[in-house]
Amino acid sequence: MPASVKSALQAQGLPPEALSVWVAPAEGGLPRLQHLSETLRPAASVMKLFTTGAALRTLGPAWTWQTHVALTGTLQANGTLSGSVHVRGSGDPSLRMEQVYLMLSRWWGAGLRHIEGDIVLDRQAFTLPAHDPWAFDGKGLRPYNAGPDALLLNHQAVTLHLMPDAARPGQVRVAIEPPLTGVTLDAQLTPQPDSACGDWREALDLQIQPTSGWPRHGLSPWRVRVRGPYPLSCGTQTWPVLWPTDHGADYAARLLTQTWTHLGGELGGRVRSGEWPTDAQPWQTWTSPTLAEVVRDINKFSNNVMARQLFLTLGGAGTDVTQPLSVTRARESLAHSVREATVSPDAALACGAMQLQLDNGAGLSRTEGSTALCLGRWLQVLWASPAMPDLIASLPLSGVDGTMRRWQGAVGHARIKTGSLAGVTAVAGYVDGISGKRHVVVGLLQHPRASAARPVLDALLNWTRQDQ
C-alpha cells in the first residue's frame, strides 16, 4: 500500500482491510498495485461500467431505440381521427420532456388534431417485477429510485423550481415542471432573509397526494404541497422529485394528456395501457439519440434509471421488441459478455460468479458487486476494444465535470466513474501517468464510515499518476 494512501486511511480512521485496490497498465500486463483485489465488494454506481461497456461493445455506439406510433381508424382531412393513437415503447432511456414535446408536435405537424378514441401505450417490451421506490433506502421521492419502464417518459419525475420573486422582493415563487393534467401546486414558503442556505430541502415539508375533485380524462386530481422556510441566500434552486405512482402509467397519462392539449390537440378518450394492434403499421417513429450519447448521460451524471433501461436492453439486443426483455435475461447476457471478454488461462483473472454479481446493472443494490481485479480486467478489455473512445468520452474528468467535478485526485488527468452508497465509496477508470502511459485504477472501499473515504481515493488517483 503506498504511503500516501496509508496516511489518508489513518487520517480518516479507516482500516486498510476496508479497501480493495487494483492498478495496472491500461494496455494489459501485471498490476503495479493490488491489495485485497480478489475480495468481492459492493461497487455502487461503478457497476455502470459493466453495463455501458458491454452495450458499446455489443450494440455499437450508433445503436438507437425506436418508439413507434400507429393509428387505428381514419385520419380525416380536418384532422379528426376516428380511432385511437397507439404508442409502443422499446425501452428508450432518453425520452425527456423535450423529446416528448417534439414527438407529439410531429403528430400535430402530420395533420392530427382531434383523437376521438384513446392514446394507447404498449409498455410490454419489458417484463418487470413490481417496483417499490421506497424499498431500497426509504427515499421513494428521489428520482434515482425510479424503476425501469418500456415507455419511460421524463424519467417519471417533476422538478420544482424555487425562485426569489423579482416583482415582490423578499418573496419566493415555486413552479412545477412539467405541468401534469390533474395536478395542482400549493406552495407557501416563508422567506428567511438572514439565514444561511444550508440544507434547505430538509427544512421543507413536501407532500404529493390525491385530493378531491372530478377526474379529467380519467385522471383523478392530485396536489403537490410545499410548506416551510426558505433562506433567500439560496437564490434559485431546483428540486427533482419522483412521481409517486406505480410503474409510470399514471405519470405517462398525465404528461401525454397535458402535452397534447397544450399543443392544441383534443382527446375524446383517455391515455391508457394496451397492446399494439397485431396488424398495425407504424405511422411515425421516434428515434432516440445514439447509444454513445446515452452512455455519456449515464456515466457523467450516474443516472440510475437510464442504466437500468440499458441493462434490460442488453437482455435481447437485436430481437423483436415483441419478445419481452427481463431482468433475468439481462443478468445472463451481461455476465456472459464480461466472462467471455475476460477469459484467461488463470481462472482467477476471469470475471466468474465469484468475482461478479449482477442485480439491476446500475449499482443501486446491496447484492450487486465486483472484485477490484474483475473491474480492472474489464477496463483493460474495454481499452483494447473499438468501444474505448466512446467509453472514455463518457467518463467524468477529475476536478472538472460530472460526478468528479469536486474531486482532487489527478485533477484533469483522470477519467473516472464514481460510486457511493451508505457504507460504500468507489472509483474506477483511467489515469494518465506523468510518464505518458495510461493506467487502469480501481478502488473499492467498504466501511460504515465510507462517506469519509474521498481523500483516500484522491490519494490513490494521485499516486497512480506519479508513475516515474
Image: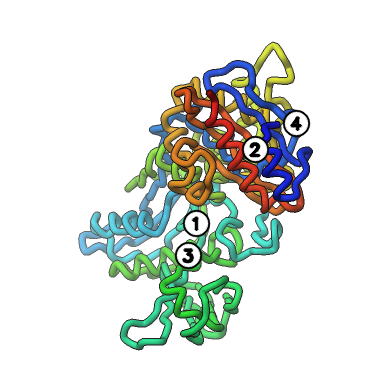
**In the image as oriented, which residue stretches furthest toward the left?**
77
Q: Which mark is residue 253?
A: 3
Q: Which mark is residue 286?
A: none
Q: Secondary structure at mark 1?
A: helix
Q: Is residue 360 left or right of residue 410?
A: right
Q: Which mark is residue 36?
A: 4
**Mark 4 is on which residue type?**
Leu
Disc with the residue nearer the chain's start (2 vs 1): 2
Disc with the residue nearer the chain's start (3 vs 4): 4
Which residue is under mark 2? Answer: 4
Foreground mark, 2 or 3? 2
- Label 3 – label 4 distance at C-alpha: 50 Å
Q: How far across and down, in percent of the image, does residue 90 sit?
A: 48, 44
**Mark 3 is on which residue type?**
Ala
- Label 1 – label 3 distance at C-alpha: 14 Å
Which residue is under mark 1? Answer: 155
Q: Residue at x 71, y 50 (%)?
A: 12
Q: Is residue 419 left or right of residue 367?
A: left
Foreground mark, 1 or 3? 1
Q: Do the numbered discs 2 and 3 sit on residues whose CB atoms are within 8 Å?
A: no
Disc with the residue nearer the chain's start (2 vs 4): 2
- Label 2 – label 1 distance at C-alpha: 42 Å
Disc with the residue nearer the chain's start (2 vs 3): 2
- As displayed, is residue 388 above or below residue 142? above
Q: Secondary structure at mark 4?
A: loop
**Mark 1 is on which residue type?**
His
Toward which corner of the image does residue 47 lie, by quadrant? Answer: top right
Of residues 347 and 410, the one drawn nearer to the viewer in this rendering: 410
Toward which corner of the image does residue 314 lie, by quadrant? Answer: top right
